[in-house]
Amino acid sequence: MKNEGETTERPDNTAFTQQRLPAWQPILSAGIVIPGFVVIGLAFIGIGIGLFLTSQTIQVLEMDYTGVEKDSPCFRCTIPSLQNCTCEVTFSLSALFTGPVFFYYGLSNYYQNFRKYGVSKDYYQLAGDTQYFKSPQDVCSPYSHDSKKNPIVPCGAIANSMFNDTFELYQIINVTKKKVPLDGKGISWWTDYNIKYRNPSSVNGSFASAFDGTVKPINWPKAAYELDLTDPNNNGFLNQDFLVWMRRAALPQFRKLYRRITEGDYAAGLPAGNYALTVHYNYPVLSFDGRKKVVFSNVSWMGGKNDFLGIAYLVVGSLCLVMSVVMLIVYAKFKFSDDNDA
Amino acid sequence: MSFFGLDCTRKKEKEVERKIRANDREYNSSFKYATNSIKTSKYNPFTFLPLNLFEQFQRIANAYFLFLLILQVIPAISSLSWFTTVVPLVLVLSVTAAKDAIDDINRHRSDRKVNNRKVNVLISGKLISEKWMNVQVGDIIKLENNQFVTADLLLLSSSEPLNLVYIETAELDGETNLKVKQALTVTGDMGDNLEALAAFNGEVYCEPPNNRLDRFTGTLTFGTQKYSLDNERVLLRGCTLRNTDWCFGLVLFAGPETKLMQNCGKSTFKRTSIDRLMNVLVLFIFGLLALMCIILAVGNGIWENHAGSKFNAFLPRKENTAFSAFLTFWSYIIILNTVVPISLYVSMEVIRLGNSYYINWDRNMYHARTDTPAEARTTTLNEELGQIKYIFSDKTGTLTQNIMTFNKCSINGKSYGDVIDHYSGQRLEITEEMTPVDFSFNRLADPKFFFYDHSLVEAIKLELPDVHAFFRLLALCHTAMAEEKKEGDLVYQAQSPDEGALVTAARNFGFVFCSRSPETVTIEEMGIQRSYELLAILDFNNVRKRMSVIVRNPEGKLSLYCKGADTIIYERLHPSCSELMKVTTEHLNEFAGEGLRTLVLAYKDLDEEYFSEWKQRHHESSVALEDREENLEKLYEEIEKDMMLIGATAIEDKLQDGVAQTIEQLAKAEIKIWVLTGDKQETAENIGYSCNLLREEMNDVFIVAANSPEEVRQEMRDARLKMCPATEQDKFLIPEVILGNTPKVVLDENVNGDYGLVINGHSLAYALESNMELEFLRTACMCKTVICCRVTPLQKAQVVELVKKYKKAVTLAIGDGANDVSMIKAAHIGVGISGQEGMQAVLSSDFSFAQFRFLQRLLLVHGRWSYLRMCKFLRYFFYKNFTFTFVHFWYAFFCGFSAQTVYDEGFITLYNLVYTALPVLGMSLFDQDVNAGWSLEYPQLYVPGQLSQYFSKRAFMMCALHSCYSSLVLFFVPYAATYDTVRDDGKDSADYQSFALITQTCLTVTVCVQLGLDLSYWTVVNHLFVWGSLGMFFILTFTMYTDGLFQLRPSSFAFIGTARNCLNQPNVWLTVALTAILCVLPVVAYRFFYSQISPTINDKVRYKVRQMKEPAPRPRRTRLTRRSTRRSGYAFSHAHGYGDLVTSGRFLRRHAPARSLGLIPTGRSPGFKPTGRSAGYSPVGREQNPKQKVEPTSLQMFRAVKDSSF
């Protein structure tokens, strides 16, 4: 419809309305694509070599202690009725295991990423909101209340299933066992420890009173406020092992940091020699064909040992180079010129 | 925004008969007739929200998301928070609602504008200016000249003698010639006597509201008398009063009950072929979704049976396996819902709207003379413009301007009209800059007439007898009427524009036709007034193809002047003219070759004795009851022989600017153009030649003009046999075979050589019968050019429907008049030529602009870009959503099929809305492979669109496969890269949140890079969008993972700290780089190889552009001069009948001309008869009887003849 009163309907002459905006118009010409592939290929091979070599320098020691096999040291602990079973796994190092050494426990066939498992926790509770102590959120079900309708704190499947094997490491020097100090501080994320999880404030000066009216998770031997009685900063929801466990894994096979070996004689690493690992075997995994293992590893700038990235970079880089050669051949054979009937 | 687009379906209880009493509002209001206000808007402020929401949820996509929302609030199923669906849904709904609201506001505005027009209404004896909307049935209103008719009126009286009014029906039927309506004498006698009118208490009983434009029945009871009323007494809303000072009318139907409004019809909602493809694809996607969910549900069942049941120690579950699988199915329906992208439809709308605005904004489609920009009236069909295969064009007003100009002539063997360069002797192209001939010596000259060859005027001034005879003939031998409005300002009313052009030419060259009476013709010859006695008019008809007049000049000499078709006249020339004939023939060929319409002029001196004897016989024959026609024919034949040739005229049916070039361009783009015109065969053919549709070099031009179905079939078979002799034999059988199986698509057949087909309406009626339509279609499609002449509007639509039915092709119809409305509505795309009077075509069109030549820009530039952009958009959109979704599918195998999402819920919500929305929108609004100049330079670029090459089921499958690959990379590379690895400080990095962040970062970067690869036109906006979106991803990710937001709502922002802890890791970035490269490089390689091994036309042109740096200057196309050797240029849009009227005074005494007069056409186009097939040129009916054609025009003569007889 034309509006009366306007003298002219002539559209504006702007680059935008006339679709004449200046623009960069790249095209996939041989002059760009082939050198591009070469450059990317070379760069990838370079990075790949770096990654691969770095990965090779990382030392990893992995030991399955589930005790499935009859001759394994922890076989006897696999009987479910047995309480407080302890077993010892020995190993020897032929060379220095360069420090700092990280001590992980690993689980496999364990679905921490199962959706209903993953949602089964109460963020408000874990942020120290005592209101939710009395009535945990429904998502925690069936671990929100015990059979007597008492609220569980911390509620939910994740907390309930917290890993509770403990380890002690000894170096065996001439029959005597020298305990290797394990550092359990600072093994969780800074944000988890400082922001995401908060203990409830003490009631009448007693931390435990804050948990009045609640019960511990069903599988737990002791309540949350008793996780580490020696160090108030490592107790309750701020217990490092608890925090590590609560950060659930993405895949059904995972490892979690247990301790760091950074102190005393072992600051530079684990010297060559024989070692004994004492395992307080509590955590049942055999019912679901799970496996438990301990891992000692050191790290580099690229993190833990992972050969995949290096190899992938090398393969992709080489493919790029091969492809650029093929392209060159194709280009030489077919190159369509401008003088034909465009 | 059409104010005719209202819903006409609203009905109260059925009205059987309408009773109206004039000037009695009370009585009339008891029937609750509609008032004159119209309402085309859909909503009001209160009904907007519920109605609009109701409408929107009728769309399957929106309903689907509502369903998802319901699923999501069921706790057992809910795998995602409700806000992941609500946020996009609300956004989509509000964008659509906003668009609907704006549309409706515009409709309200146009309603208001129409409703508030003013008209004079007679209320209690006084004329009061009222708004249209307040006019009621039974009111008497006064219309003045050039006013729109307010409502359907019974004409009461008028300012003109005999109670006539002249109306223009352009808005109703697109015809610009005037129609006549006449009031009853009994009402007409009231004149403009307000007292009489106010006292008028006639009662009208008439038919209920209906949409028949050409029919009206009713009676008027006034006093004691009853008068019957028909269509001739009625003025319809939509007409305009012309040449009539005033008239009074009684409102019969008002507002929505007027015939115009009843006739508006439900304009069918057009969808593009992409839309239709999308519907199929969406179904396919639903199938894919169901399949994936079933696989995952089964997987869940198996997993529960094996691993899951044992995992109960840490995660007890109550459900049994089957129920768990069932719930999993629905949970995955929620998670994988992103394969049906919610924002897809709304984005498509936005893109189409944007591209429509480009059409509105294009200065190259703006016509300065009429101040008309192009307008995309339907904003949902843009990409269809890039796929047109067939164009159906009207002729008059579309290809031509409907202006005839006297262009050249040949007098006594000398050709005039060309401008010859003095030095080179070459003919020059006539341009605006040349000085036209100065006609100032002639005070009666028409200033609008231009002629460039000065030698003709010199010849006139030299008083060469042949030249004088030539123009004297033109001034005498015609049936035009002259009217001298002011002193020296002559206006000719000619029955056809050709004749007008000839008489005007004679006028300018000094032989001015001044006036006529039944017995005389007065002309001014070089300033001297002379009166010729008109003794006989041997009128024109289609068989005779000539007309003659017999006059006695003031000196008493008898002459016969004749003009007509070359072939006809040549047979009747005196043998002594043979020399002259040869030269003239050469000239005629030359004229015909230039596409001019030619007539040959001849004269003959008669001797008195013979003539009086002939006259006697003529009189006897014309009063005889038997064989009158034949006898007259013989008499004419007898006297029109042994004539002396004078010369020939050449009239140019002026084409719109640039028509020939446009047609050439469109032909290069492999678009087939069919001309469907109501004109005569000769004129249509002529235009075919002049605008390059038909060419002399064509192997053959078949003309199908037969009178029986068998002949038509035979002619078409002959044509096919000629075009394709080798394989024709077995093909005869095909139609029958196919007919049994109701064919879907008729494939194109290869033909050697170029052929043209001209078929007339009569034959077309047979050809469109169901048993012959395939034969016709095949024949027509084998020809390069098809011209259908003398077709009715209905046939136009039928032809379009036929092509739509059997050809898998997109059609476009372009026209300017109401007779084109049916085909404009029938075709996939309707284009109206705007800027002229008669808006009906424009109002029912999807796109409108002022000139035919803009069509090439609309299709080759806007259409192509729109299609390209839409296809790129769809390909990319599916890619990004599939890739996004499939990752969940792979993850299912590693999370116990538990419907665990890979990504953070915030990311899921924002992915389509924020992170990837703008770059792809930017691409679909700005992308262009080559600029407009090159698009026009290489019309071949248009071809891929016709073949739907850019987006098809195949392309969709490729997208899905590509996505599948990308999603595998996007899942497994992060999987492998984080598997059992840790951060550089030894802490975990394989936790779920980190993995989610890594994957979503990889995904966002990958789809951005992929977009960058697809984007071939990086404007500032694109840079801003691409980099901005990428930046936005990181900004929002970091923001959502901050401490503050977590403390605000811990459960929603549980990913606190993940970004900080994860994105500082070098191997995370190496993973991102690796995935992006792995996803994109194969695509680059594929495209490179593809463009090298079989480069597309786009590749070639882009490569060429790259080398040229700037567009090459477009070659100036000069009009080729063609030499014709076999074609007659005769074409004369003239109908039989004026001659009788001019010579007989009889009809002055006829009070009312017989039968309906309103909407029967004159020469220009057949009337709009919106009834069934039989309404057209049915093979059985005898509607082509030329006699019937006489009547409408005869009425226009009333005044002229009456004046001249004073």
Image (spheres, coloured by chain):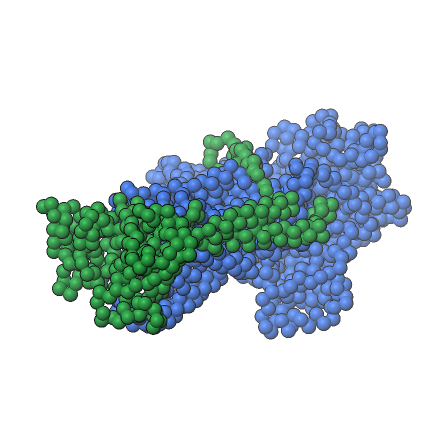
Chain colours: A green, B blue
Q: Image height check: is B770 above or below A7?
A: below
- Quadrant including the C terminus of chain B: top right
Q: Position of residue A256 (x, y in %)?
A: 33, 55
Query: Which one is in front, A150 or B285?
Result: A150
Query: Which residue is at the far front?
Result: A174
Looking at the image, which residue is at 56% across and 51% down? A317
Q: Position of residue B1058 (x, y in %)?
A: 35, 47
Q: Nearer the viewer, residue B375 or A166?
A: A166
Examine the rendering and report whether any part of residue B80 can be seen.
no
Residue at the spot 71% in from the left edge and 41% down from the top edge: B652
Image mark count: 0
Which residue is pictured at 58% across the width and 48% down the height? A41
> Relative to residue B519, is residue B990 depicted above or below?
below
Where is residue B219 shown, x and y percent of the image?
Answer: 43, 54
Q: Residue visible at 60% across and 65% down? A: B745
User: Where is residue A109, by image quadrant?
Assistant: bottom left
